[in-house]
């Protein structure tokens, strides 16, 4: 019997319609499995989703999500469902100081890892001491083979004599906010991975991608893909329990609308939702150990401020904003055709800031708009038409030193059941790439349980230039 024939006789239920669940579901449907996705909400994308905001009447993303050229599994998933062309790519990162002075980080024609050096040397936002500090740190990370997972990024930076400017304008802003955590709450290997992938391995790896459509519209294509492969998605399907029948070798998944039977099960939920479901799954010692590990995980918040102005306040599509609470500016009307290009729809992102998250709506909006005017003077002349403040309190999970021991593998404590989610052991921090990788890893584990050794994980981008010698 061929693997395709074997797969056609197997039913798979995927619980969760986020990036992790959809990447697993689409990969398995492509192999001939009959896949059913159970999603508790009425739309797809999980924490990378969009919805109609009642206060503004606008469709907004729950937070701006970006990908990079090194996100091979996420890009592979987009290619699979036919939406890769809906990503706007930019290899330039503009850093702006209060007052408006700009510096641009962009790759040159030099081979990796030297491709970013000319831009760093030319940047006006970094002093000579800052530039030397960054070059020293990059070089040290480039030659560091196995960063200590018990060490924090803050400890490593202290031992590598980083200047105040390098700390505040690069490490705390670009790196810590990218990982959405304070420097002392970032395990060194994850910081090293970000540096290697975005700034050292190749110019392509560091290109930034953003969706040109609302996120849920992007992932809606996964539903059409599954339907084309004789699979389906059930919305508003709240899973309450799951039971394993040893004799029949089948799962019975209980939802509010009734039971659902399946040969195989993939739980693709955030770690809190997984923990909440676990008391209603078969009990065993391994499940208890998993629950204990999940208890060590913690989420960090991200705040986003959405602003609609009556005119264009900047020609930039996105920027990094220095020395203020607001960290990232995304000018979505510049690269989303569904927006009014004569106005400005701006999303400001504040990462790793529990202090900002604690502000009232009025105080947060005033602080954000006042600070935005320091970078773009046209804000003073523009009329603010409407605004929204989104506090995503469970935006990402933390990656502090020692976290790897708490990240579960794709193989679960239960028969014919597999785990996916950005929090599982993917080797990546909390990103959409980690979610997509987890989906592919769960699908691989499922295949292996059936004796199929095919690989579904998309390999990392290979280092280029001189970095090939250090890989």
Image: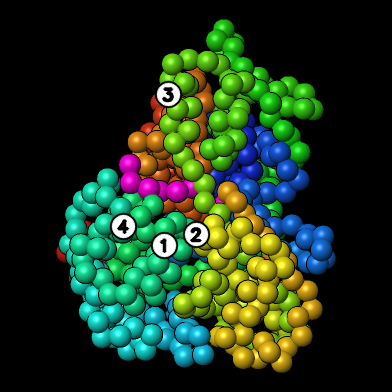
Residue 76 highlighted magenta (yes or no)? no
Q: Which residue is mark 3?
A: 289
- Indicate the secondary structure of the residue bearing disc 3: helix
The answer to the question of whether label 2 and label 1 lie on touching residues, with beta carbons closer than 8 A, is: yes
Closer to the eye: label 2 or 3: 2
Q: Which residue is mark 2?
A: 352
Q: Is residue 86 visible?
A: no
- Indicate the secondary structure of the residue bearing disc 4: helix
Q: Which residue is mark 1?
A: 176
The x and y percentages for residue 327 are 52, 71
**Residue 461 located left or right of residue 278:** left
First in sequence: mark 2 vs mark 3:
3
Q: Alpha carbon of mark 4 to alpha carbon of mark 1: how far?
A: 9 Å
Quarter of the view holding residue 426: top left
The answer to the question of whether label 4 and label 1 lie on touching residues, with beta carbons closer than 8 A, is: yes
Q: Alpha carbon of mark 3 to alpha carbon of mark 4: how far?
A: 28 Å
Image point (70%, 81%), residue name:
344
Please give the label number shown on residue 153.
4
The x and y percentages for residue 47 are 61, 51
Q: Alpha carbon of mark 2 to alpha carbon of mark 3: how far?
A: 29 Å
**Residue 261 located left or right of residue 274:** right
The answer to the question of whether label 2 and label 4 lie on touching residues, with beta carbons closer than 8 A, is: no
The x and y percentages for residue 65 are 56, 62
Image point (43%, 43%), residue name:
456
First in sequence: mark 4 vs mark 1:
4
């Amino acid at each position: 019997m061929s693997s395709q024939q074997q797969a056609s006789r197997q039913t798979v239920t995927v619980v969760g319609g986020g990036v992790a669940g959809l990447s697993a579901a689409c990969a398995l449907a492509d192999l001939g499995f009959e896949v059913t996705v159970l999603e508790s909400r009425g739309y797809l994308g999980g924490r990378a989703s969009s919805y109609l905001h009642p206060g503004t009447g606008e469709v907004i993303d729950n937070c701006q999500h970006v990908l990079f050229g090194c996100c091979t599994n996420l890009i592979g998933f987009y290619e699979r469902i036919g939406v890769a062309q809906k990503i706007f790519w930019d290899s330039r990162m503009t850093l702006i100081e209060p007052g408006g002075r700009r510096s641009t980080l962009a790759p040159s024609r030099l081979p990796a890892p030297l491709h970013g050096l000319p831009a760093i040397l030319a940047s006006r936002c970094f002093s000579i001491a800052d530039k030397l500090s960054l070059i020293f740190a990059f070089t040290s990370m480039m030659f560091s083979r196995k960063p200590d997972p018990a060490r924090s990024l803050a400890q490593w930076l202290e031992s590598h004599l980083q200047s105040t400017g390098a700390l505040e304008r690069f490490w705390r802003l670009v790196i810590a906010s990218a990982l959405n955590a304070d420097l002392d709450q970032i395990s060194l290997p994850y910081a090293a991975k970000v540096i290697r992938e975005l700034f050292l391995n190749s110019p392509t790896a560091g290109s930034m991608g953003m969706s040109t459509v609302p996120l849920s519209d992007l992932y809606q294509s996964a539903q059409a893909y599954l339907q084309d492969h004789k699979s389906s998605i059930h919305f508003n399907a709240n899973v309450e329990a799951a039971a394993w029948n040893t004799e029949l070798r089948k799962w019975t998944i209980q939802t509010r609308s009734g039971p659902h039977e399946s040969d195989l099960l993939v739980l693709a939920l955030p770690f809190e939702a997984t923990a909440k479901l676990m008391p209603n799954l078969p009990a065993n010692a391994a499940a208890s150990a998993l629950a204990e590990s999940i208890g060590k995980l913690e989420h960090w918040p991200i705040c986003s401020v959405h602003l609609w102005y009556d005119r264009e306040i900047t020609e930039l599509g996105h920027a990094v904003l220095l020395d203020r609470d607001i960290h990232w500016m995304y000018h979505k009307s510049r690269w989303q055709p569904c927006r009014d290009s004569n106005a400005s729809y701006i999303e400001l992102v504040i990462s790793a800031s529990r202090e900002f998250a604690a502000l009232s709506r009025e105080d947060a909006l005033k602080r954000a708009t006042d600070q935005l005017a320091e970078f773009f003077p046209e804000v003073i002349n523009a009329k603010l038409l409407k605004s929204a403040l989104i506090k995503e309190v469970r935006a990402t999970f933390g990656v502090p030193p020692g976290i790897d021991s708490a990240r579960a593998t794709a193989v679960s404590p239960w028969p014919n059941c597999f785990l996916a989610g950005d929090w599982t052991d993917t080797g990546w921090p909390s990103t959409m790439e980690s979610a997509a990788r987890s989906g592919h890893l769960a699908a691989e584990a499922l295949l292996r349980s059936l004796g199929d050794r095919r690989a579904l994980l998309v390999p990392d981008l290979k280092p280029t230039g001189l970095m090939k010698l250090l890989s």
